[in-house]
Image (tube, coloured by chain):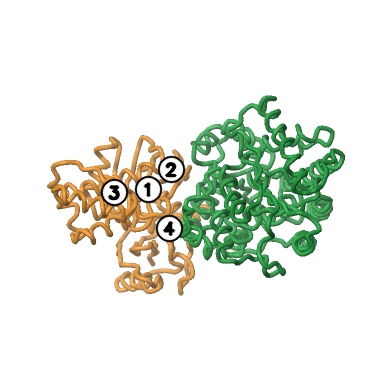
Chain colours: A orange, B green
């Protein structure tokens, strides 16, 4: 029997299949859409094809409650912290950049959350900011990182309001600034918004769908912070953490 | 951890509260209809005692703003004020209130008022913010009535005689104008009596709030935010004194019988900043569901003016209204926080950063970080607003609050 953790985020739903030792066996991601049940079912069905899964399903994220199957819901922040600490086993700061939220978490020496903060109520510093600008520039977000590697100059995108950023970019295009340079500016804007959430401790871990899909963002973070890491497939960490939190509970009992 | 909403224990004093508030509005309505008394508009921490002692009925636009917020009507009115030149970034009490006025609507119409009571004079104190002056100026111009004010210095560290004498003089300087408007001669004995009543009401209000020092607490912030009505609008009257005696008795009974406000209180929170009026009920149930009681708050504690002294009414009024939390420097505010954290056995602090009320958002100048360093009490900041619900992300805030409570619980283990 395998356990399943699902992080039902605003943009994507991420699932992990975990064995009894807490090791991830498989992971699967789907677009959330408007029905959390459908998104979660897709994950469960995918895992069920080859594995026997056990209930309850361990959930976190915006859609964590009121699902039509047995669940144990968790805070995505506590779950993410659990997974990060399991990986690195040290005091660190975490910046998680998702579709609609950017989160800062401070994990102490024993793996507890000492402090956390979420982005203010706007798109600045989140995946939505990138997606909106990509839409306006008519460049697929999947090409962003690749295109930005050709950047020659670091341009500064000043506005944190997405609408103002669009007008700022129009101004840049009129001035002849290249798309790679503009995308680099967008990346730096996302980074600036996220690091102003809180003072960063000595070790920094970057997680979330945005760094997974925009690897250049991780590289840019690493230029700013010496002790910066980002594990592969980091968008699945909160889902994994949901399972880990509950594995430990059983051990404690 | 699916969190179920839980109803906190209901206070039976609510019926007495309702009657006390109803009677207050009946007195105001009688003054409107019979013109038996002049009507003064007053800011919520303005010179209510002076106005009551000189025979005015006193109306508080901020109370009206809170009613618009709590009745979820503010969102309907704010855009009207914005369309008429008021920024959505300024006080949403102001924009909701002026917007409602421009639409000729008020929740008071349900109790028989045609409109908000027309003022004969508007009296403000800038101790809380200067925006109240701008707010009152709109109505002073509209109704062509006098506007009087006390300008209190901001960011007070030491409450010295130079500040207090200046403010006391400003209180005294109101008297000749108020005599002309009210048609009543100022009577120092009446003023002393009113200041005495205000002192007594505030002392009782303090005792009410301090019952929450008891673990588990018999009252929570969401109750207090409602039950503070009389101390805001009837400070200086026997009505407030009578009501808080009733409420205090009920709370003391609860303590005696070990009845807590939140059925299974495990976490005790300090709330800084304004209430989110439009979410009062749902937040109350959410926190109760998290076995969490908000036991102390900057907001409710702000109406404890027990420095008022009938033997020295002007100077003590200056002292009481300059000692107010909101008008103090951060270093003084930090002392208050530390005392309340200790007195109320606080596990964590929630700072509500209210988009349109910077003076009531104490998280903006590094205070939470400094406080955590000194007290080791964790804090959470949530973004919202007192009246403008468009500034609040409920989904995001619920996740943050649940996580915070989880964090506090894990520290207790």
Calculate the distance from the C-alpha at mark 3 to the C-alpha at mark 1.
Answer: 9 Å
Seen at 54% across and 54% down, the residue is B92
The Cα–Cα distance between marks 2 and 4, rounded to whole angstroms, is 16 Å
Residue A84 bears which disc, if any?
1
Gap between marks 1 and 2 measured at Cα: 9 Å
Q: Which residue is mark 2?
A: A107
Which x, y percent locates residue B190?
A: 85, 43
Query: Image check: B347 left or right of B40?
Result: left
Kindly indicate whether the residue at mark 2 contacts the one at mark 1 (C-beta within 8 angstroms): yes
Q: Secondary structure at mark 3?
A: loop
Q: Chain of mark 3?
A: A
**Residue B128 drawn above or below residue B276:** above
Q: First in sequence: mark 3 or mark 1?
A: 1
Tag 3 near tag 1, CB within 8 Å: no
Of residues B100 and B269, the one drawn nearer to the viewer in this rendering: B100
Q: Label for residue A242?
A: 4
Q: Does residue A19 appear left or right of residue B290 in this picture?
A: left
**Residue under circle 3?**
A231
């Amino acid at each position: 029997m395998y356990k399943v953790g699902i992080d039902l985020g605003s943009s994507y739903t991420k699932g992990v299949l975990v064995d009894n030792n807490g090791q991830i066996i498989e992971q699967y991601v789907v677009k959330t859409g408007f029905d959390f049940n459908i998104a979660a079912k897709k994950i469960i069905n995918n895992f069920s094809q080859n594995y026997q899964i056990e209930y309850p399903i361990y959930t976190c994220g915006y859609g964590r409650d009121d699902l039509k199957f047995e669940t144990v819901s968790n805070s995505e922040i506590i779950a993410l912290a659990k997974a990060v600490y399991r990986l690195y086993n040290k005091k660190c700061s975490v910046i998680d950049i998702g579709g609609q939220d950017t989160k800062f978490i401070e994990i102490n020496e024993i793996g507890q959350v000492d402090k956390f903060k979420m982005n203010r109520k706007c798109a600045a510093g989140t995946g939505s900011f990138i997606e909106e600008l990509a839409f306006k520039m008519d460049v697929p977000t999947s090409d962003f990182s690749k295109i930005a590697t050709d950047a020659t100059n670091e341009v500064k995108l000043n506005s944190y309001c997405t609408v103002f950023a669009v007008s700022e970019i129009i101004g840049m295009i009129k001035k002849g600034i290249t798309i790679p340079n503009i995308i680099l500016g967008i990346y730096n804007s996302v980074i600036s918004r996220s690091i102003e959430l809180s003072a960063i401790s000595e070790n920094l871990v970057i997680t979330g769908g945005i760094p997974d899909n925009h690897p250049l963002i991780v590289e840019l973070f690493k230029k700013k912070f010496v002790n910066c890491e980002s594990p592969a497939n980091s968008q699945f960490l909160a889902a994994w953490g949901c399972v880990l939190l509950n594995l430990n509970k059983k051990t404690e009992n | 951890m699916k969190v179920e909403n839980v109803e906190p224990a209901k206070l039976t004093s609510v019926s007495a509260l309702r009657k006390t508030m109803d009677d207050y509005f009946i007195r105001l309505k009688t003054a409107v209809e019979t013109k038996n008394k002049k009507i003064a508009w007053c800011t919520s921490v303005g010179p209510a005692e002076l106005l009551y002692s000189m025979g005015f009925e006193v109306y508080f636009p901020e109370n009206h703003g809170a009613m618009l917020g709590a009745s979820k009507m503010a969102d309907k009115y704010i855009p009207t004020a914005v369309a008429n030149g008021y920024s959505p970034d300024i006080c949403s009490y102001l924009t909701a209130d002026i917007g409602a006025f421009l639409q000729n609507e008020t929740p008071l119409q349900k109790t028989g008022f045609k409109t908000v009571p027309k003022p004969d004079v508007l009296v403000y104190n800038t101790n809380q913010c200067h925006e109240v002056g701008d707010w009152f100026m709109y109505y002073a111009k509209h109704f062509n009535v006098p506007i009087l004010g006390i300008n209190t210095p901001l960011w007070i560290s030491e409450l010295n005689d130079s500040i207090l004498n200046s403010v006391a003089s400003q209180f005294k300087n109101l008297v000749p104008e108020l005599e002309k408007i009210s048609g009543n001669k100022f009577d120092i004995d009446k003023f002393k009596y009113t200041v005495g009543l205000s002192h007594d009401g505030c002392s009782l209000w303090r005792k009410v709030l301090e019952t929450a020092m008891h673990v588990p607490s018999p009252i929570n912030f969401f109750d207090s935010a409602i039950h503070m009505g009389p101390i805001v609008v009837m400070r200086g009257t026997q009505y407030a004194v009578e009501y808080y005696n009733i409420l205090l008795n009920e709370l003391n009974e609860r303590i005696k019988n070990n009845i807590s406000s939140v059925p299974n209180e495990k976490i005790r929170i300090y709330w800084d900043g304004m209430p989110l009026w439009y979410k009062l009920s749902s937040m109350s149930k959410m926190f109760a569901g998290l076995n969490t009681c908000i036991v102390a708050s900057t907001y409710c504690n702000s109406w404890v003016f027990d420095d008022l002294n009938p033997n020295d009414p002007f100077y003590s009024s200056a002292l009481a209204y300059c000692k107010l939390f909101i008008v103090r420097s951060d270093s003084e505010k930090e002392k208050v926080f530390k005392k309340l954290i200790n007195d109320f056995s606080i596990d964590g602090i929630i700072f509500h950063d209210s988009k349109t009320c910077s003076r009531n958002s104490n998280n903006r100048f590094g205070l939470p970080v400094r406080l955590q360093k000194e007290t080791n009490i964790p804090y959470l900041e949530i973004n919202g607003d007192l009246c403008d619900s468009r500034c609040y992300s409920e989904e995001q805030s619920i996740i943050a609050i649940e996580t915070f409570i989880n964090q506090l619980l894990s520290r207790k283990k």
